[in-house]
Image (tube, rainbow, N blue to C red):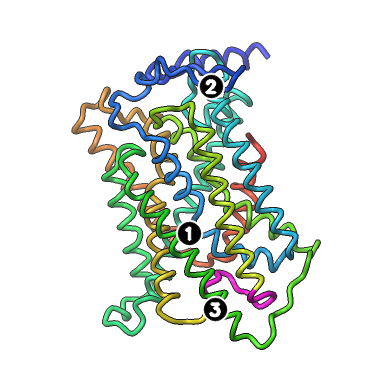
Amino acid sequence: MTLHHRQQQSLLSNSDTNNTDSYRSTDTEYNNSQADERVPEASHLSSTTETFFHIVCITAGTGILQLPYALKSGGWASMAYIALAAAISAYTGKILVRCLYYKHGVRLQSYSEVAEAAFGPRGRLVVRTLKDVNLLGVVGIYIVLAGISIDSLVVGTPVEQFGERFWIAASAVVVWAAIVAARQIHDVFVLSIFGTLTTVVMVVIVIWLGVLDLEFMHARPPTKAIDIRMMPISLASICFSFGGNLNWPDLEASMKSPKKWSKALSLATTFIAFIYACVAAVGYGVYGGHVRSPIFLSLPSGIAVSIAKAMITAHVLLACPILLTAVFIEAERDLDISSNTLGVFKERLWRAVFRSLLMLVIALFALFVSDFSKIVPILGAVAASLVVFVIP
């Protein structure tokens, strides 16, 4: 106990003095008197609206495409999982940020530091590994999905001959360019806006096509109320769709008004749960036991589906740089890659080199792993469920 206490005190005493907001646990409000000290330049801070878009862009990704299939697995009862997962995700997101301020006058900097304060160095190692594997794996899947989607969109064009692997590699290059160019989360705000808009457009198209297709069906495919045996698979897929908590410490740290974090998270999670429920209900209600994952495979082919595919492709590419910030910011802090120690030029150089090397690893992963439908439940059941729903 003494050793563990000393480890916690060491962790707190070594925290960056530029991150010393205080949090009053009695009324869950932040004291912003020191808010300007956390980030050297106010221009790098995000507004509450920006944070809302960041949350939606990070969370409402490709997981939405397999929600109708999740209902096929567990039945209509799985709709309750969407509401439950949203409520738990929002709650754990709030208590995770609250834990950053568990000692008055000191703000921990990451999810990993919270784990160390709670469970010791081994806890930090476990959580850090789960977090990084989950985020890097998700980005790899996103790049794979983008490449596959682009390859299907260019069928019948002169670039059709390039093939799937070429477009996966090209998608990785796009993500690499964005993540190397951006320093702070605020720098990718435009990506969050467009990422959210592409998701909304895609959702509208999916619902519209599903409703139109229903009119031409002679008999609606059968559905089921509940399938106890498949409920765990359904839950895993839905949990994966709410796996954004790993980025919350960095998002909250980038806010101009940290005390509005809970409001931004609640609004964003409610919006995400709403669009999830709409897509899941329409997809499963129209196609029933015949629904496929992703839902695009069940929709009638045409220009509208191509637009929806283009939207989700744009979304996953726009979300990747934001997801990677949680990995890069903490790793670069551990490696002491900062302008204070290296100078501006060397800091930018080493940051670019480090991020480029890690993106190369992700690209290689993406090129050799392409079974999206099998990886989603695995990530949801193991890494995402643990770090989002259990550990907080």
Q: Are marks 1 and 2 in contact (CB under 8 Å)?
A: no
Whether residue 235 sits left or right of residue 59 in the image: it is right
Residue 364 locus on image (x, y percent) = 40, 59
| Residue at the limit of the structure toward the bottom, as seen here | 218
Quadrant of the image for the C terminus? top right
Q: CA distance from mark 2 to mark 3?
A: 48 Å
Earlier residue among tags 1 and 2: 2
Q: Secondary structure at mark 3?
A: helix
Give, as a three-letter code, the residue at label 2.
Glu
Task: Identify the mark at residue 141; answer none if there is no mark.
Answer: 1
Task: Identify the mark at residue 29; answer none if there is no mark.
Answer: 2
Quadrant of the image for the N terminus? top right
Give, as a three-letter code, the residue at label 3.
Leu
Give yes or no for residue 294 being in the magenta stretch: yes
Q: CA distance from mark 1 to mark 2?
A: 38 Å
Q: Residue at 34% across / 77% down in the picture?
A: 154
- Disc 1 or disc 3, which is closer to the eye? 3
Q: Residue at 48% across / 40% down in the picture?
A: 247
Whether residue 196 sits left or right of residue 103 in the image: it is left
Earlier residue among tags 2 and 3: 2
Residue in the foreground of this view, choosing between 274 and 84:
274
Instruction: Give, as a single range, the part of the protein colored magenta.
Output: 286-299
Residue 10 locus on image (x, y percent) = 51, 14
- Disc 2 or disc 3, which is closer to the eye? 3
